[in-house]
Every structure is written in C-alpha cells, then in structure tokens.
Amino acid sequence: MVDTNAVNSIDLKIAVLGKSLVGKSALTYRFISDKFPTEHDTTIEDQYKINTTIDEYNCKLEILDTAGQDDYQSMLDTWIGFAEGFVLVYSIDDRESFDSLKSKYDRIVKNKAEETFSIIIVGNKCDLEDKRKVSLEEGQSYAKEKGVDFMEVSALKTINVKETFITLAHNLLNKKIKPK
C-alpha cells in the first residue's frame, strides 16, 4: 500500500502492447503530446514520462511503447515485468491483431499472477468504420469476459485517447491506494 502522505508523486508504469501497425505509437504519442505523428519509424521500444493528476493525486506515468513485430516478441516478458498497467491495442480493421491479443493477455496474467496489475483493451482506428473487421460488440464481449475495461479509440481523430490512459491510471491508483 502506498503512503500517499509520504510521496510527492505516485509512479505508475504502463506498457502499450499489440501487433505491429495497430497504432500503439500514435496512441501513445497523441496522449503524451496531443499531436498525431506524421511520420513513423518502426518502434522497438520507446519510453515516455508524463506527470498528471489522477483523483487528486500527483502521478508520474511511465509509458513503454513496445514493438509489435514478431522479431521482438522475445522481449514481451521483459515488458510485462516492467509494467503494472497494460494497454492491449488492436486495430478494428485487422482481425489478426484482435486475435493475437488473447495470447498477450494470457501471458500477462501468467507473469503477473502474484502482483497487482490492470489491463484495458483498446480497439484503435474507430474512425475506419467502413473497413471494420472486429465489431464493437466483440471487443466489449472479450473485455467483459476477462473482467477488464474496454474502449474504442482513434489516435488520428483524438477519440478516447486521454480517457484510455486516465482510466487505466485510475484503476492502478485505486489498487495501490486501496488494496483488497
């Protein structure tokens, strides 16, 4: 349990995980800078820090934007070990990206079995409704089955970007301050 009187800020570590090209970096960058990246190099691992207020507590969010390519999946356990909060991202126009989240979810649960952690499942690119391959109901149903939060977002159109990270941070903070 965190003694909130003894700290200037509460550290919350978040990893953004998902298949390549689902928009993990765009989502993270939009949250950090409120800008959409116009150019993008393939991510291996980028780390960002941002100070914010969650439920009247000063929090330092440390966000790890991870690679989605198969070549880097050997690093998945390291990324899971780093974080206590996870944004699992798929693209609504990429069925495989949704299906691949299930193994990442299972890996997190296995690796974090004895620890406090939170997960939010995010369907990115909700602005591409005409190219949708994963229904809103499928995303909601999977998240409900796992007992985690869910949002559809658009990093491009700034839909639910801030809400995603704030919801996850709020859940983490509640677990740190008010453990069961």
Image (cartoon, helix red, strand yellow):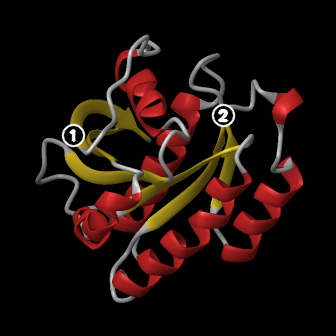
Q: Residue at x 43, y 58 (%)?
A: 86
Query: Based on the displayed image, in which of its 4 quarters is residue 49 positioned?
Result: top left
Query: Label 2 crowding class (10 Å Cα cut-off): few <14, some 14-19, many 20+?
Result: many
Residue 45, given in percent of the width and then of the height, sits at: 24, 45
Q: Residue at x 31, y 39 (%)?
A: 43
Tag 2 residue: 153
Q: Is residue 133 shown left or right of residue 124? A: right
* The one of 165 and 152 positioned closer to us in this rendering: 152
Q: Which three-letter amino acid code belongs to the residue tagged 1?
A: Gln
Tag 1 residue: 47
Q: In the displayed structure, would residue 141 be above or below residue 37?
A: below
The residues bearing labels 1 and 2 have C-alpha atoms spaced at a distance of 21 Å
Q: Is residue 97 shown left or right of residue 168? A: right
Q: Residue at x 40, y 75 (%)?
A: 179
Q: In the displayed structure, would residue 40 be above or below residue 92?
A: above
Residue 17, given in percent of the width and then of the height, sits at: 44, 54
* The one of 92 and 11 positioned closer to us in this rendering: 92
